[in-house]
Image (cartoon, grey):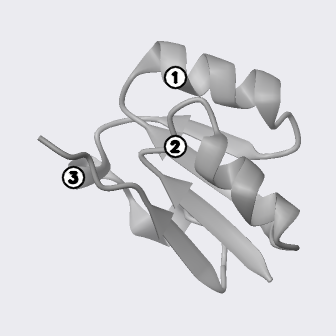
Amino acid sequence: MTTVDLFAGAGGFSTGAEMAGARVVWAANHWPLAVEYHAINHPSVQHVCQDLHQADWSLVPRHDLMLVARQQH
């Protein structure tokens, strides 16, 4: 199962997905430091640093599952 991770942070959600047997292929976050750490933790994943409201979704790899972290306020 291929997975993309939105608002990926340092990669905790991606790690959990991989532990469950998914293959994370793409991760995005608007914060450069988060993308840098996600890339360290998940070097085989394609990374994008951008505001997802402005993303070109045609460039996102085909996937079976989309991970979306919801921030609590």
Q: Position of residue 36 (x, y in %)?
A: 63, 18
The residue pinned by badge 1 equals 34
The residue pinned by badge 3 equals 53
Tell me which numbered mark, 2 or 3, is placed earlier along the sequence: 2
Determine whether label 2 and label 1 are within 8 Å by CB: yes
* Residue toward you, 49 or 10: 10
In this image, 44 relative to 9: left or right? right
- Callout 2: SS: loop
Q: Is residue 5 above or below residue 2?
A: above
Residue 48 falls in which quadrant of the image? Answer: top right
Q: Nearer the viewer, mark 1 or mark 3?
A: 1
* Residue toward you, 53 or 43: 43
The residue pinned by badge 2 equals 8
Q: Position of residue 67 (x, y in %)?
A: 51, 66
Q: Residue at x 20, y 46 (%)?
A: 72
Type of the residue with mark 1: Ala
Q: Residue at x 76, y 76 (%)?
A: 2
Type of the residue with mark 2: Ala
Q: CA distance from mark 2 to mark 3?
A: 15 Å
Q: Residues within 10 Å of mark 1 (few under 14, many from 20)?
A: some
* Residue toward you, 58 or 22: 22
Determine whether label 1 and label 3 are within 8 Å by CB: no
Q: Is residue 66 above or below residue 56?
A: below
Type of the residue with mark 3: His
Tell me which numbered mark, 1 or 3, is placed earlier along the sequence: 1
Q: Is residue 67 above or below residue 32?
A: below
